[in-house]
Amino acid sequence: MPAPKELDPSASLAALYGTKLRKLRGRAGLTQRQLGDRVPIAHSRIAQFELGNEVPPEDVNGRLDLILGAEGDLVDLWGHLRRTPYPDWVRKFMAYEARASAMHKYMAHSVPGLLQTEDYAREVLRLGQPWCTPAEIEEMVAARMKRQSLLRAQRPPLLWIVLDESVIRRPVGGADVMRDQLGVVVQAANAPFVEVQVLPFAAGGHAAMGGSLTVLSFENAPDVAYLEAGHSGELVEDRAMVARHSYRYDLVHARALAPEASTALIQQAMEEFGT
């Protein structure tokens, strides 16, 4: 079995939490599976907590604190962690996003957060993180809505989006929620700094089938790429790799419908969701 990944506890609160949890578990003489069985929770989730990739729900954290005899240390640390609704890997991407002059996005599964309605965002977050409490979901929804201020800036970035056709066909939250969400996408597509295209099912296989892809460009800095799948993300800064991912985006973009045809297809989907 490979040695566990070494975390720098000074790198972030999530890394500090993961390091603390691993030390407490080792001191208790428990494997990840044994600890997971006692909570109870899947041992793979324990691994994610220890890697700093995921923050446990409050009730799970309380159980971990009790089982491992942390005497409230995990509870206190969790409180600091929960002050931000975003994990560290998302915050780093958002810092780049806030400085970008152009964003090129291929969205494999959902409307990008910058264009989501509250109802759509709430459903996406609820489905994707079923362990979160309603209050935690609302906190994340509020943070996502606040993030949309980027598009209301005096000089907003260029936003060029390619939506997989499944994004406009899948009734996330039901017909009413989808109709309103697609209406927002159509409205945004009329803005001078936003372009929206749809990659139709008829295009078949394509270069970005592994998940969503974003390429950020800056006025005085090299491009970066961001790969997202489920609840993990990878920020790519190596120039050679960024160039490859940019090429993948270009290939997808080339197979998408023209903006006018894309808008027509989105409006057709809205009509199919009813009035």
Image (spheres, helix red, strand yellow):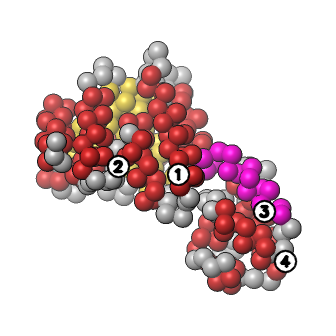
Q: Give the percent coordinates (x, y) of residue 273.
A: 18, 48
Identify which residue, 225 or 91, lies in the foreground: 91
Q: Nearer the viewer, mark 1 or mark 2?
A: 1
Q: Nearer the viewer, mark 1 or mark 3?
A: 1
Q: Residues within 10 Å of mark 3 (few under 14, many from 20)?
A: many
Q: Residue at x 34, y 22 (%)?
A: 193
**Disc 1 versus disc 3: distance between alpha carbons?**
22 Å
Q: Residues within 10 Å of mark 1 (few under 14, many from 20)?
A: many
The boundaries of the magenta stretch are 72-89
Q: Give the percent coordinates (x, y) of residue 217.
A: 46, 30
Check disc 2 and give the amino acid type: Ser
Q: Residue at x 41, y 33 (%)?
A: 103
**Disc 2 versus disc 3: distance between alpha carbons?**
34 Å
Identify which residue, 184 or 164, lies in the foreground: 184
| Residue 73 drawn in magenta | yes
Check disc 4 and give the amino acid type: Arg
**Disc 1 versus disc 2: distance between alpha carbons?**
17 Å
> Residue tagged by mark 3?
74
Above/below status of 251 relative to 45? above
Q: Is residue 198 left or right of residue 45?
A: left
Give the image quarter of residue 187: top left
> Residue tagged by mark 2?
110
| Residue 130 drawn in magenta | no
> Residue tagged by mark 4?
27
Q: Residue at x 53, y 40 (%)?
A: 142
Question: Is tag 1's residue or tag 3's residue first in the polypeptide sequence?
Answer: 3
